[in-house]
Amino acid sequence: MEPQMQLGDYAGLNIVFVVLAIFLVFAIIKGVRIVPQSEKYVVERLGRLRTVLGPGINIVVPFLDVVRHKVSILERQLPTMKQDAITTDNVLVQVETSVFYRIIEPEKTVYRIRDVDGAISTTVAGIVRSEVGRMELDQVQSNRSSVIAAVREQLAEQVDDWGIEVTRAEILDVNLDAATRAAMLQQLNAERARRAQVTEAEGRKRSVELQADADLYAAEQEAKARRVLADAEAYATQVVAVAIAENGLEAAQYQVALKQVEALAKIAGGAGQQTVILPADAVEAFGNAFRMLKGRT
């Protein structure tokens, strides 16, 4: 009987060793935690925060340390939010916003806030209403960047206690109700009509100015031509006067005779003139001119 009891004891010991080996393997498995790159694990010990495991291989105390929360640290986008707001000129607008954030301190996020998305949405709505309420409609339409900057700055201050980082905030659109949109359209059409009238009036004014400049230029050129002609006639008169002063009456008679000859030449050279009737004194004028010319030579 004794040998049989020894064999039984060995069998029992083998079972114990196997159980211990299984327990040891299980403890090792429980004590080693491999965290993915995009996550962080929040570990509790006996119901209290113990540590936060980062990406890679981590060692914890088996059965005492428990991974209670697995938190993704990837950037997240909230669903597009729409907030109604009233501007300082009493216009109701609907602002569409979009917010991107990521969790950087999971221990704050899991223990200080229950619904992160809802809390951020509510905070953004309050900030947008506050900022839009300080502006007129035109400012809201043209200064979206200032509203976005205010939303990002104030939101970052609000969510700091939640272990969240706001990476981006955008205003997608600013919508108006139908009545306001119709009024703005009428105002826009009136402004376009006014600009068209101003442009047309400026065109007419410019045309008148250019025409006046052209008339002035023409008058100046005509006056200049008259001055030149007057100067030429004055010079010719001066030359004749000098000739008379030097040669006496003969020079004057010579000039008069030349003028008569030129006049007769023009009459004779006219179109359709076949016969030229000369007055009696014209022959005498020719004779005088020739005599004077001969006397000069």
Image (cartoon, grey):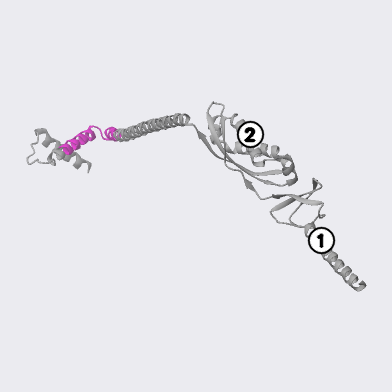
Q: Which mark is residue 23?
A: 1
Q: Few, some or many C-alpha atoms within 10 Å of disc 1 (few <14, some 14-19, many ≥20)? A: few
Place residue 297 in its image quadrant: top left
Q: Furthest-front residue in view?
A: 1
Place residue 169 in its image quadrant: top right
Q: CA distance from mark 2 to mark 1?
A: 56 Å
Image marks 2 and 1: residues in contact by CB distance under 8 Å: no
Q: Few, some or many C-alpha atoms within 10 Å of disc 2 (few <14, some 14-19, many ≥20)? A: some
Please report whichever mark, 2 or 1, sits nearer to the chain's N-terminal start: 1
Tell us which disc is closer to us: 2 or 1: 1
**Label 2 belongs to which residue?**
127
Q: From the top left corner, tell me how far across and down residue 13 is, in percent.
A: 87, 67
Task: Considering the whole magenta stretch, tell me its main secondary structure.
Answer: helix
* Residue at image location 82% in from the left, 63% down from the top: 19
Position of 175 compared to 128: left or right? left
Is residue 255 at least partly visible in the picture?
Answer: yes
Residue 148 sits inside the magenta stretch: no
Q: From the top left corner, tell me how far across and down residue 104 is, in percent.
A: 72, 47
Place residue 111 in its image quadrant: top right
Mark 1 is on which residue type? Phe
Position of 238 compared to 158: left or right? left
Position of 281 compared to 65: left or right? left
- Which segment is the magenta one? 236-263
